[in-house]
Image (cartoon, rainbow, N blue to C red):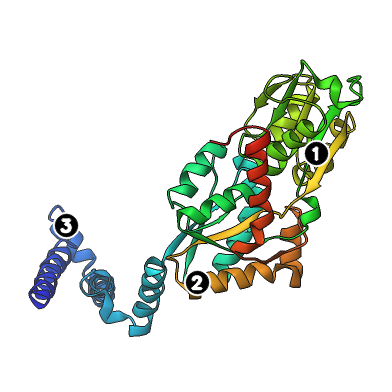
Amino acid sequence: MTEILRRYSLITLLLLFNFTVSADVSPLESVPDKAKTTQISEQASEQNQESVIIKWWKSLLDLPLLAGWNKQSDDIYEPSFSTQSKSKAPKYIIGIHPLHNPKRLFEVYGPIVDFLNANMPEAGFTLEASRNYEEFDRKLYSGHFDFAMPNPYQTVNSLKHGYRVFGKMADDDDFRGIILVRRDSGIHSVADLKGKAVSYPAKTALAATMMPQYYLHTHGIDINRDIENRYVGSQESSIINVLRGHVAAGATWPVPWKTFSKENPQLAAQLEVKWQTESLQNNGWVVRKDIPATVADKFAALLFALGDHEQGRAMLARIPVTRFEPANDYSYAPVEAFIATFIKTVRPLE
């Protein structure tokens, strides 16, 4: 069939060529004019015909069916090979719990995902943000993410939904709750919060919600009766609610507070860290158990080595964290113990 089409294309082209050559002499040209220009026409005839032939030969080579005749086999093969390799590479979705709003999350973690893609040509990775904790929880617990960095509470829960822990953020001392107030608020003791509103990112945020609520509980506040709890969706929102005076105090954790203070020093100066909690294990890295071990191991190795080179250290500084480090399911036993105590003494977790 291909040979027939090629012959058909050649015949069509030859017919067009004959028509073009015939049309070179205009039927409206007068006989005397022809006589005057006979000598010139004869001299240019061969050049014109050669030009037409070259033009149509180039057109012939440009035909889709015949274009391959004018190219080396390598020129055709290499782009095809490259495209096929990329399209056949398995795709994996990476989820980061709402440490920041989606825009900020892509700014901070996007470069890390780009680095993984550049160094793992056998796989493709896509970073996926979630609007809030509820959406992230739904995706995580349904197995939507292939790799994820949940908070420690979500990390523990993910073990019941087909995931395993392979790593975590370092700097556990930074994984603690902090409670912010305005410097001009007049709030001096925990008791001064009674009858007032306190903001948090979400009910399931461990460092920024559960740990501050446990702190308040152990310092004489019944969080279910003495204060109004407002879950405002993100770390930044909790900080801004305090800044604007919408709440008397707002809970977050050191990482977003450091980022906010660095980027908005004049605004941050209006706030102060009034109280802070004890620390727990930092955010975990989990992988779905059906992901090939070769992929998971290389992914982990690249993460853990970010602190070993300048490019990686720049990425970590944006989070900010000094490194990612190996961990396993048992690393989060203290978190499980805290959650059990929290449910028993403070409030139930849905």
The answer to whether 28 appears left or right of 188 in the picture is: left
Give the image location of residue 331, x and y in percent.
Answer: 66, 62
Q: Counting other residues with Cα less than 10 Å from the Cα at mark 3, is it few (<14), some (14-19), or many (20 or more)?
A: few
Say which of 63 and 258 sits in front: 258
Give the image location of residue 121, x and y in percent.
Answer: 50, 72
Residue type, mark 1 in image: Ile
Which of the two discs, 1 and 3, labels the residue nearer the N terminus? 3
Q: What residue do we see at 64% from left, 53% from top?
A: 109
Can residue 72 be seen here? The reply is no
Which of the two discs, 1 and 2, labels the residue nearer the N terminus? 1
Which picture quadrant has residue 209? top right
Task: Label 1: state its secondary structure.
Answer: strand
Q: Counting other residues with Cα less than 10 Å from the Cα at mark 2, is it few (<14), some (14-19), or many (20 or more)?
A: some
Can residue 98 be seen here? The reply is yes
The residue under label 2 is 295
Discs 1/2, front: 1
The residue under label 3 is 26
Residue contact at pointers 1 and 3, CB within 8 angstroms: no
198 in relation to 65, above or below: above
Residue contact at pointers 2 and 3, CB within 8 angstroms: no
State the CA–CA distance, disc 1 to disc 2: 37 Å
The answer to whether 39 appears left or right of 324 in the picture is: left
Task: Label 2: state its secondary structure.
Answer: helix
Say which of 92 and 343 sits in front: 343
The answer to whether 257 appears left or right of 80 in the picture is: right
Residue contact at pointers 1 and 2, CB within 8 angstroms: no
Q: What residue do we see at 79% from left, 51% from top?
A: 174
The residue under label 1 is 178
Task: Label 3: state its secondary structure.
Answer: loop
Q: What residue do we see at 82% from left, 31% from top?
A: 219
